[in-house]
Amino acid sequence: MNAKFETYHVERTPRAPLLRADVERTSHAPLPRAGIEQTPNTPLLRADGVTLQYATRQSVTTATYRVSFEVRRGDLFAVMGHSGCGKSTILNAIAGNLHPVEGTLLLNNKSISGPGPERMVVWQSHDQLLPWKTVLENVAYPLILNGKATAQVARAKATQWLETVGLARALNQFPHQLSGGMKMRAAIARGLCFEPEILLMDEPFAALDALNRAHMQDELKELQSRTGTTILLVTHDIAEAVRVASRILVLSPHPGQVKAEVNGAQTDAERLELTALLTQLLHEKHDHHTEEV
């Protein structure tokens, strides 16, 4: 196998009421990115042994178990796996809406204790804009609401980011006048307007048709390359991860554990090899037990 696509090796040992997942790293070098200083010893985001659970009166369901990974500045880092593997739960925890029962989540070496403007989220639905506000107002409004800028400065900043994502001619249009792809670009501009440390994207293109989805994936990769924005992208789509990601974390089925982490592909030959590897990883059996307490 090409050394570029070496993965983590995972050994599993039963441990009630959960399973142990000891991960030995064999290859974890980020791809070099033009114009972005690499700081391998100081990751922007670090998950260290993160276990996430949902509790009801009847049971406790483990969504992820001892998941560890690092996201460096300038990464377009994809988290993928089957439905129910906990990938969106991890994003929700990074956003500050859920706290680990075990392990730590660090941003800039500081524990994540709640939501914050340094972590902006773009959700799956493209209908996340306020319908009574124009595109410009939608993007500027959060800056004004959170006291980050005056109305004049917010509108100027929003205009700049809308131009960056190709919506310069749609500033005064309302959401119902936009296509699905245009709505998603507006949502991305709204997130970037805060100039966050990391942009969190939860399957943002899932609701688009195949042609628009591929187009938006290319636009996202080009935008990220141009701006240097660090992005964590949740996806279940192998083709999407191969198309856009600089690094890819693969989770096992529920409860999610780290199954592999690989670098992205740069050439057509590498994309074919990476697609085959990810297909194999997602379809091979993963021997662990789902525990509900």
Image: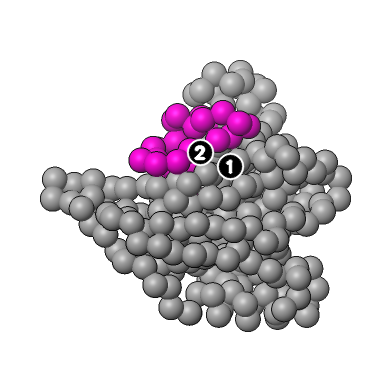
Residue at mark 1 to residue at mark 2: CA–CA distance: 6 Å
**In the image, residue 167 above or below residue 193:** below
Query: Which residue lies at the image location 60% right of the left edge and 63% below the top edge?
Result: 8
Viewport quadrant of the N terminus: bottom right
Residue 82 seen from this side: yes
Q: Quadrant of residue 247?
A: bottom right
Amino acid carrying mark 2 in the image: Leu
Residue 173 visible? The answer is no
Q: Quadrant of residue 288?
A: bottom left
Image coordinates for residue 166, horizontal then vertical, percent: 71, 51
Q: Identify the residue at image location x=44%, y=30%.
A: 114
Residue bearing the label numbered 2: 105
Q: Are marks 1 and 2 in contact (CB under 8 Å)?
A: yes
19 and 83: which is toward the camera? 19
Question: Can residue 110 be found in the magenta stretch?
Answer: yes
**Which residue is the site of mark 1?**
46
